Structures are given as structure tokens and as C-alpha cells.
Amino acid sequence: MIKTFREFSQNKQDSKTPKYQQLVNTLLIDIESGNLQTGQRLPSINEASEECYLSRDTVERAYSELHRLGVITSIFRKGYFISGKSAKTKTKVFFLVGKITENNKAIFNAFVNASNKDVTVDIFTYNYKSDNFREIINNHLGNYHYYVIMPHLIEESEENIKCLKKISGERLIFLEQSLASLHGLNSSILSNSGDEIAQVMQQNIKHFKKYKTLNLVLTEDEYFDSELITGFRDFCETNHFDFQVLDGFQDEEVMPGNAYLTMDDVDLVAVIKSAEQQNFTLGKEIGLISLNDNCYKEILAGGITIISSKPTEIGKMAANIIQVGKRQQVQVPMEMVLRKSL
């Protein structure tokens, strides 16, 4: 009997993941690691059922999922074999985000560009709704080799955790945010923590000292980690700045001696317009910082200072995890790029 099946029968399996999916995950790992070679014959459904103490229906369903992925092929009266062409030329990736925001697009594009040419990626959105989140994942279990997920605004409820545990830890990659219950069980590339923004602002404190009041401008259009508010507040209190947290900027006017950190580009433009209408100069009477970068921010209004969670780097790291095939947990530090607006 093939080593993969023998070890599967001996190892204690995750009771919360369906048996057929456990077998699919195990076979995928061994195929991609080279433990199972192209053209190698797999046990028949009856043989695998007996060796792994599984029902015939379970083995048949696992083989059907692998066949649909193109990883194995069946030959009439000969059995199931590792498919050389499909196994080597296609790695399917499931990419799940809350919404298609500028930040998420930057991560996704960097991921796709850094991936090998044999990787195909499908992107899905769950609109920050847990029901949608679970439904989309459940509908695509077994259809992909890897699951890259940005679990923004997803609570650690029993239902959500149970759903995510159906995916093998070797196949699951969290981006930007993780869930404490699953920490260390899968790969994660995290950013946007409160500590990170407080630290990067502290490193550049001399550029903030000419302003009396710092304003954090929130938005409903772009996701941001709520810990950013905590980190911003901690920085202001530690350094004795007056500060405000504003719910958007559409009905506001900039005030001299104030600096504004905007989460959304609509508010960024609104701050610039208000400063121009009152003849205030960015970087002098008014300070302006934007969360995350775009090519136009380098030239907009003479250059907009940015604090970045490095979305491009996050996307590249996620692609590298798949290429290396090794589980990793990474914390990406934020960076500040100083330009004229501060």
C-alpha cells in the first residue's frame, strides 16, 4: 500500500473536517511535494477504503474531487493515476475578500504577478457578511489547492471557525487579519495593527510636532482594522497631542494647525479641496497623511505623505508561501513615506 494511505490511516485526523476532504488534502500535499509521482497508480476505491478504514462513498467522493481538480485521471479497467500534465501545470487558488477596495486590489494584483505561470486565481467577495463568507467557502471546498482569505469583519463565532477548519492548515493563508482560535494552525501575513501605526508615527514624530491637533478620518468604503484607532489614540496621548476621530470629512472644513490622516481617497481629496479654498498650504498650516499608496499620490498636490501597510509586499509574500509550500506566520511592519503634504 502507498505510504500516503498507510500514514493517513495511522494519523489522528481532524474530526471537524469531512473525511473525504481530509483525504483530498493529504493527497494534494503528497502530490505537490513529490511523494506521489506523475503516472503513479493509486489504490482502487475498495483498496483505499479497507486500508484507511473509510467508506467506499468517502473514497469515491475524494477521488471525484481530485479528478475535478485535474490532479488524478482514471483509465477504464486500470484504475486511478496521478495526472502528470494537470498536476504540474495547474495550481488553483481561491482568493476571498470582503470587497474590491484599492488596498485589496493592490494585494491581489501583487499576488497574481508574483505567482508562477502555472497558478490560476479566482477572486470572490463576501461583502463583509458572515453568512456569505461561510456559503462561498462551503461551496468551493475541494475545488482549489489553496485558499487565500482576508477575514475582515469576520467574528470568531463557532460557525465561522467550524467552516474555516474544513480547510487544511497547509492550504489556508490569512492576509492582513487572522483569528485567534486558528493562530499557528495555518499561514498568516498580518499588518495594520495598532502597535504598528503607533510605532511608525513615533519614528516620525518630529514631522507631527508643528501641528496642534491630529485628526483620524474614518470611512465606510475602505476596510480598516479597528486597532488602528487604538494605536492612533495611544500615540496622541503618549505625546500629548489633541486629537479627534472623524466619521468622514464631507461636511468638515480643515483648520490651521491640524493634521489629517485619511483612510479613504474621497476624504483625501476633500481635505485638499478645503485647504485650497481657504488658501492653506499643505505641509505648513495643514498636514495631510493618507493610508496606503497609489501612483498618483506621489504627485497629487505636490506629493501626499503616506502610511502604508505594504499591500504589494503582502501579496508577494502570499505567493511565496504557495511556491515554497511551507506554513509561515509573518507580521509586516508599516512604513511612512514622507512627502510635501506633512
Image (spheres, rainbow, N blue to C red):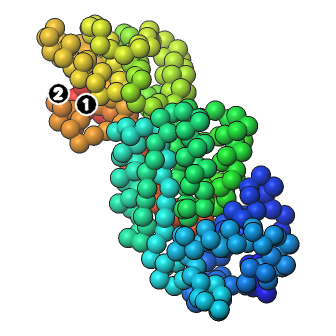
Coordinates of residue 43 in the picture (x, y in percent)? 73, 84
* Left or right: residue 155 compared with residue 20: left
Which of these two is toward me, 97 or 323? 97
Quarter of the N terminus within the rendering: bottom right
Quarter of the C terminus within the rendering: top left
Measure the C-alpha gap from mark 1 to mark 2.
7 Å
Residue found 30% across the figure and 21% down from its top: 267
The residue that disc 2 covers is 301
Coordinates of residue 83 in the picture (x, y in percent)? 54, 83
Residue positioned most to the bottom:
78
Coordinates of residue 130 in the picture (x, y in percent)? 59, 35
* Left or right: residue 206 compared with residue 47: left
**Looking at the image, residue 23 lies above or below residue 311:** below
Which secondary structure lies at badge 1? loop
**Looking at the image, residue 254 lies above or below residue 121:** above
Kindly identify the amino acid type of the residue bearing the numbered disc 1. Ile
The residue that disc 1 covers is 304
Residue found 43% across the figure and 67% down from its top: 119
Residue found 64% across the figure and 61% down from its top: 170
Which secondary structure lies at badge 2? helix
- Badges 1 and 2: C-beta atoms under 8 Å apart? yes
